[in-house]
Amino acid sequence: MASQTSGIVTRPVPGADPKLYNSDLAPTAPEGRTWGTFSIFAMWMSDVHSVGGYTFAASLFFLGLTGWQVLAAMLVGILAVYYLMNLIGLPSQRHGIPFPVMARVSFGVMGANLAAVIRGVVGIVWYGVQTYFASKAVQVLVLTFHPGAESLTHGGFVGLSPLGWGSFLFMWFFQLAIFQSGMETIRRFIDFCGLAVYLVMFLLAAWILWQAGPASLSLQLGGQPLSGLESLGMMANAAMLIVAYFSALLLNFGDFSRFSRSEAEMRRGNFLGLPVNFFVFSLVTVIVTAGTVSVFGEAIMDPVQIVERIGNPVVVVLGSVTFIVATMGINIVANFISPAYDIANLWPEKISFRVGGLITSILSVLVCPWIFVSSPQAITVFVGLFGAVLGPMYGIMVADYYLVRREQVAVDDLYTLSPAGAFHFEGGWSRRALFALGASGLLSISLALLGAFGLILNVGDWGWLIGAAAGAGLYWSLSTRRAAAVAS
């Protein structure tokens, strides 16, 4: 008999150990698979359609490449993401299990906690950062209609002014209220977010075209274009930048694909939401960015600044509210659901998805994201270190499922601590996975740090790919040797 909590309909697992099981982590029941093609598509719209996504897409046109070269690199990069996302999403779609439970297949029923903590920390930090960015838009709205509130922007506590605290806590409570309503409410919310941002972006593009004229627009924003091998190298870097942008969700997409009704709908939703949606959104972004050169005399890569420059209070409200919604959308997709599941996985007896979400929200405040984002060095180190570990985890999980296990998983064994269970390994931990993670993570982190300090050629965002390939290769090699030893 299926059970339901947090809007998730799951099936019970006979004999499941309470240290590994609750109804949120259990396999999704057939009647709980309510996400069709549009819901997956809308999820990706929520992830891409944000201020960060806008700035990222626009920045690719400043790399010194011609317009067609950027578009070609975009196409290669986003098609690679589409393929990689299908690989990591398919196991969870088939078995109905979230990322931290799927990680037990490779890392063991206890070792998966390590993988969950690493992914959870990344989500918590960025959840706080995105909430802070959204709160700045709230502050703009307050000052637009109540200029006297400017006095509240001085002084403050722990680096944030009274108005800053009020705006941040408003966004904090508003998001928490939606998140605590359960997965179905979350699904309906993200179904709305992406379309709302598209509407405003199309209106903004139409206004820019009306003001600047189509003839004044150019897809070449980076000055003198590169030539020869330089351009090929930069195109490859641009493609890898796109893969790196999606690196977090390349690990925990299973948190969403577990609700997909079928593999075909998951793939269609991914195709519409990744290659098609990313390409269209990027084109609209560059049209708006290129138009700002003619309209405002400079390229403006922040859409909130554009609506502020327009100066119409109605436009300011519409734009600010829309990008607040967009930030909430990406917070749900990339930064909330994963740590909520990951924290629940640490203590399923006491922590549900809702409680995990509450803990995520509280920890995101303790991070003091306004201090964190004030230090570019801190952000660079954080992204580099944790990104260098996310790639190896992806490689290990994909190699294990497709090459070692040949897509066969005894799902009920994921919820037992019995030594006879298929995923008990060595006391609940897989030494093979831990060694592969440690060695490949050390490699990718070392390359990133050495490159950052100029001691070797900077591999930049190739670190994710290097780590993923090294993790997959090491794990597969260790597994092959183990199988040969057992057979002999």
Image (cartoon, grey):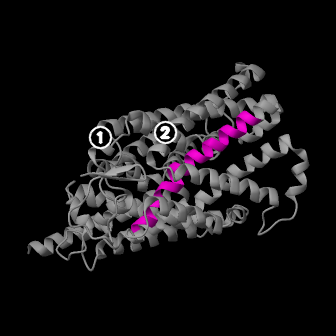
x, y percent for residue 194: 55, 36
Vertical side of 49 occupied by 407: above or below: below
* Quarter of the rendering containing residue 70: top right
Say the numbered circle drawn on residue 263: 1
Q: Earlier along the polypeptide chain: callout 2 or callout 1?
A: 2
354 displayed left or right of 98? right
- Is 338 included in the stretch rendered in magenta? yes
Spot occupied by residue 42 in the image (x, y as percentages of width and height): 48, 37
x 71%, y 36%: residue: 319
Say which residue appears at 51% left-offset and 62% top-offset.
387
Q: Which residues are magenta?
A: 317-345
Report whether residue 245 is seen. no
In the image, residue 52 lies at what x, y percent? 63, 47
- Is 150 or 184 nearer to us in this picture? 184
Q: Is residue 453 visible?
A: yes
Residue indicated by mark 2: 188
Q: Residue 410, percent across and down? A: 19, 60
Q: Depth check: 319 or 157 in front?
A: 157
Q: Quadrant of residue 49?
A: top right
Quarter of the image for residue 267 reads top left
Q: Amino acid at mark 2?
A: Arg
From the image, give the main secondary structure of the stretch colored magenta: helix
Residue 334 or 20: which is nearer the viewer?
20
In the rendered image, residue 300 lying in the magenta stretch gets the answer: no
